[in-house]
Amino acid sequence: MSISLMASFKQPKANANASANLAFLRWTAVGMLAMMLSALVFMMAVAPANASSKKEPAAEEEVANTEPVIPDTVIIPDPVSLTVVLPKSGTIRQLVFNIWLEAATKQDVEVIESRMPKIINAFLVDLQRLMYRDTQNRFETREPGKRGFKFDAPALLPPPPAKTEEELQAEADAAEEAAEKGEEITPEPPFSPFAPVPNRYFSALQFKLQKTAQAILPPDTLRSVQVRKFYDHWPGDAKKR
């Protein structure tokens, strides 16, 4: 009798243990499932971030592509060289100019190139006269070895970013509206990579050379003349060994 009672008392305890183990397994499975779902959500969230980060080099490439470029409207002839001699002292000064010509349009380039020999000869006449006075002044006011001079024009400007479709559409709408009113919108001048020259002497020299070239060319074909570089050499100022 006692044995059967003990068996009856042990059976509920075994059932309880089994239920506890089953509940534990269920909670463990639920926890693992939740962890897997969380990991999946995290991976999905990280993927767009990686995709956007991969686009950053493209933006950097766009910045890199905004480096200065020489437009096809710019003509770069050979450097202009001349020698100035002061008769009384026999002083010799050798000068070199890098002069670029900027055409108004691509179609004007051929016109300017066809008359380039005349333009260069006219430049030489202007430069010979101007540099003679400058050479004489430097010879009289500066010591040997301190008469030389060098000039470098400002760096070229990078081109502006391309206009968006919205900007182009706005310009077209404005032109259409002006045409309906009988008005005309002056178009923007084409981009020029040349910054203003802070040196007043060379700024005035560019203006003088531009006027000289325009007198040889048809109207409105030449946009500007740019002195990009200048340097000189005084052979008599060299130190004797």
Image: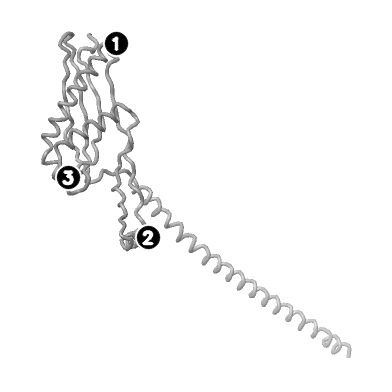
Which residue is more in the foreground, 47 or 220? Answer: 220
Q: Mark 1 points at which residue?
A: 143
Q: What kind of element bears circle 3?
A: helix
Residue type for callout 3: Val
Image quarter where the C terminus lies is: top left
Q: Nearer the viewer, mark 2 or mark 3?
A: 2
Q: Mark 3 points at which residue?
A: 109
Name the outermost residue toward the front. Answer: 182
Q: Residue 170 carries which label?
A: 2
Colour setup of the view: one colour
Q: Is residue 112 left or right of residue 169?
A: left
Q: Is residue 55 above or below residue 130?
A: below
Label 1 or label 3, whichever comes before in sequence order: 3
Q: What kind of element bears circle 1?
A: loop
Which residue is more in the foreground, 38 or 214? Answer: 214
Q: How crowded is mark 2: few (under 14 residues within 10 Å), some or many (20 or more)?
A: few
Label 1 or label 2, whichever comes before in sequence order: 1
Residue 59: % across, % down: 40, 53
Label 2 or label 3, whichever comes before in sequence order: 3
